[in-house]
Amino acid sequence: MSADILKIFKGAVRVDKNGGVYTPYRLTNAQLERYEKKPLCPFSKASAGIKMEFITDRDEISFGYSYKCVWTHFDGNVPTFDIYADGVLQKIANIEMNKPNERLYINARLCGGGEKCVTVYFPHNAFVSVFDIDIGNFKCIPERRRKLLVYGDSVSQGLMGNTSSVSYVENYARFFDMDVLNLSVGGEVFDEEAIDENLCYLPTDVIVALGINDAAMITDFDVIGENIKKYLAKINRIYKKCFVTVIAPTVQL
């Protein structure tokens, strides 16, 4: 396997390698430490927005995976790996539930001959590692010109959906041909401490999509208003050269 294997991982701030096992993380150490103190937000290590992307001439690929945690909220809410070739869905592989830490395997046949661009979307509602990555002689995909950063809650994380590739964040990123780093965590509120100024990711575009949990958990709208002001002021200061979109929750008047 090429030494460039780490470069096929997208949507992660770091990838830990331990004995051939690769564990990607999308949040910084400072952010992960903060979430350890927030029991209502246990999803910080979920693999939302993380992918393997590469070019290969193989007609079939395979890899192993294991998971430490899954988060499901209703019958049929199963985490998946979604595998695409040249933008066309090839396989939706359900994680085998009730087998934490076991070594499990996925293989997928890819349509079309010759070189193809392959994307493997990781589950947004599970914390996974991968190993035994068999993708043949591959080429790395260069960084895209536009880079999206997302701060949100469960909706932007895609927490209660199934197929990881069809969340609104992933659809948006595909439509505009963006790389994406999704820092959304279910249960999050407007809290400026969630924003890490030392994040090693330089976005061109930022989405902030919060507020649902504020109304349900904080309830004091004066406090919520001040939190929003502080949060957006920090976003504006750090990302003043970016195109920033703020998505407010729908409310019934």
Image (cartoon, helix red, strand yellow):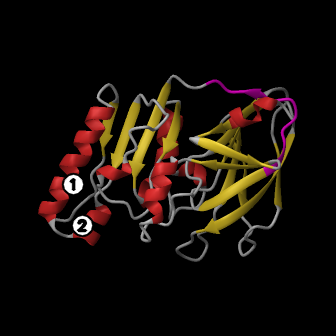
Q: Position of residue 8 (x, y in %)?
A: 70, 35
Q: Position of residue 174 (x, y in %)?
A: 54, 36
Which region shows up in magenta? 131-142
Which of the marked residues, 2 or 1, is nearer the chain's N terminus?
Answer: 2
The residue positioned farthest toward the left in the image shown: 222
Question: Which residue is rendered at x = 81% and y = 41% of the image?
Answer: 110
Q: Position of residue 209 (x, y in %)?
A: 34, 50
- The C terminus lies in quadrant: bottom left
Callout 2: 10 Å neighbours few (<14), some, many (20+)? few
218 over 170 or under it: above or below: below
Q: Which residue is mark 2?
A: 215
Is 139 magenta? The answer is yes
Residue 117 in view in this figure: no
Residue 143 in view in this figure: yes
Alpha carbons under labels 2 and 1: distance apart: 12 Å
- Left or right: where does residue 84 sit relative to residue 70? right
Q: How many numbered marks, from 0 up?
A: 2
Question: Which residue is rendered at x = 44% and y = 53% of the image?
Answer: 156
Nearer to us in this view, 20 or 168: 20
Under circle 2, the secondary element is helix
In the picture, the disc for residue 227 is 1
Nearer to us in this view, 117 or 189: 189
